[in-house]
Amino acid sequence: MVNNTQNVRFTKSNICLGGISVGRRYIALMRYQTKSPRETQQIAGRLAKKIARQKPGKEAVVVGLIGDLGAGKTTFVQGFARALGIRRRMVSPTFTIMRRYRIPRRRIKKRAPGSYYQLPISYYQHLVHVDAYRVHKPSELKVIKFESWLRDPAAIVLVEWADLIEKKYLHRARIVRFRHQKEGLREVVVRGF
Ligand SMILES: Nc1ncnc2c1ncn2[C@@H]1O[C@H](COP(=O)(O)OP(=O)(O)OP(=O)(O)O)[C@@H](O)[C@H]1O
Ligand SMILES: [Mg+2]
């Protein structure tokens, strides 16, 4: 692992653990400590906007969310969705395994030297929220067309309990790990963004 820490701000609760350079991209491993659900949502929002600005690849962006019951995975998804302009209330997809939300193609004005540009806020169209805790048989992933969502370049797929599904689905995934520290306090470790 290359220890390259440029462009990373250090505060007590925001620590860069290192990272790797892939081509021109620098992928950091970040550790945050959040003191409230709101703070967890803010981190999620920042990451969502970062992804939304990146041009889609050949397949979906996959984010695996790993952590115990009540660690903050759904809270993270809520902040992520809101930052993309999704207004619908997010609930845990406990009974449905999956929910899909349309990402609005809202346009924003951005100032450039001497002119204004209209830019899409997001290149992506679908936010797919999966709760793998409820997946008991691989065939259930077929029913929700999980693999075809993973291949859709216009989709961002967030998977709660990503550690419970087969690894083959997650080889390109960005990973967020949540740890319950004490009441109200969570450690959030982010890799691959
Ligand atoms: N710093 C924090 N970040 C996130 N959630 C927090 C924090 N502090 C307290 N909480 C509370 O912890 C709970 C997290 O619940 P959430 O549904 O997000 O967890 P989860 O990881 O999705 O659980 P599950 O495995 O059951 O789906 C919420 O009740 C939230 O208010
Ligand atoms: Mg949840």
Image (cartoon, rainbow, N blue to C red):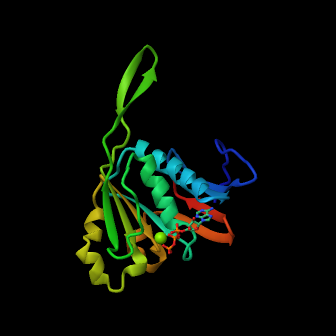
Residue 12 in picture, x, y percent from top left: 76, 53
Judge left or right: residue 174 versus residue 138. Answer: right
**Depth order, front residue of 80/139:** 80
Residue that extends furthest to the bottom in the rendered view of this protein: 137
Residue that extends furthest to the front in the rendered view of this protein: 89
| Up/down of 27 relative to 147, above or below | above
Q: Residue at x 46, y 45 (%)?
A: 49
Residue 105 in picture, x, y percent from top left: 30, 41
Q: Which quadrant of the rendered structure holds the N terminus?
A: bottom right
Residue 190 lies in quadrant? bottom right
Residue 172 lies in quadrant? bottom left
Judge left or right: residue 92 versus residue 178. Answer: left
Q: Residue at x 46, y 66 (%)?
A: 64
| Up/down of 158 relative to 85, above or below | below
**Depth order, front residue of 167/97:** 97
Q: Residue at x 61, y 54 (%)?
A: 39
Q: How many marks?
A: 0
| Up/down of 115 relative to 10, above or below | above
Tell me if residue 28 can be seen.
no
Residue 15 in picture, x, y percent from top left: 70, 54
Residue 171 in picture, x, y percent from top left: 43, 68
**Depth order, front residue of 7/72:** 72
Tell me if residue 135 can be seen.
yes
Residue that extends furthest to the right in the rendered view of this protein: 12
